[in-house]
Amino acid sequence: MKFAAACCAVAFSSFAASAATLPANTMVVVTPVQEVSSKKMKEGDAVAFQVVNDVIENGAVIIPRGTPVKGTVTWRTGKGIGGKSAKFEVTFNSVQLAGRDWGLRGSHRQEGRGNTMAALFGSMLISGRSAVMTPGQLINAFTSEPIVTQ
């Protein structure tokens, strides 16, 4: 009986001590924490996202769903006259895990819908629509470095 308990203790301690590694270039699906609109932003603004699904490697959850992700607005245009829509681009910076920021890469460009009536009639008085990202919108980011957890 003592032998079985000792074997279990050794097996458990070696399992607990082993680290899990998520390789670089692993896809992480994220969504905005709140609405992101071209009306209310400028280049350089921080944008908060969260991980949508657990990211699993070899049966271990490396990045749990709900984990915070940081992004930055890296490009923006306002809506224009003649039906031109607003556009912006968000670049993903990092995922915050176990008190550390792990690098992410990738970006997402969001475009507002154009105003086709203005384009058809050549109206200079009608402008396009703002670009908006909403919570629940799924966007792909990728790890830029291996993530090692204990």
Image (cartoon, grey):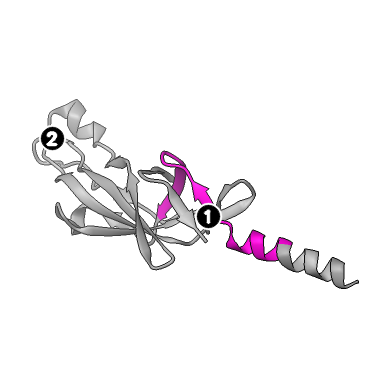
Q: Marks 1/2: CA distance?
A: 48 Å
Instruction: Indicate the position of residue 85 as horizontal and vertical percent values.
Output: 21, 39
Q: Nearer the viewer, residue 25 or 13?
A: 13
Q: Is residue 150 visible?
A: yes
Q: Give the range drawn in magenta.
A: 11-31
Q: In which quarter of the image is residue 139?
A: top left
* Residue 23 in magenta stretch: yes
Q: Label 2 belongs to which residue?
A: 82
Q: Label 1 belongs to which residue?
A: 62
Please, what is the three-letter code of the amino acid marked with disc 2? Gly
Instruction: Indicate the position of residue 69 as horizontal and vertical percent values.
Output: 37, 57
Q: In which quarter of the image is residue 120?
A: top left
Dot 1 lies on which element?
strand
Q: Nearer the viewer, residue 95 or 122?
A: 95
Q: Which corner quadrant holds the N terminus? A: bottom right
* Furthest residue toward top: 120
Q: Is residue 137 visible?
A: no
Q: Nearer the viewer, residue 101 or 8?
A: 8
Q: Nearer the viewer, residue 35 or 102?
A: 102
Please, what is the three-letter code of the amino acid marked with disc 1? Ile
Dot 2 lies on which element?
loop
State left or right for residue 31 relative to residue 59. Answer: left
State left or right for residue 38 relative to residue 94. Answer: left
Q: Earlier in the sequence, mark 1 or mark 2?
A: 1
Question: Looking at the image, which residue is at 40% across and 42% down?
Answer: 142
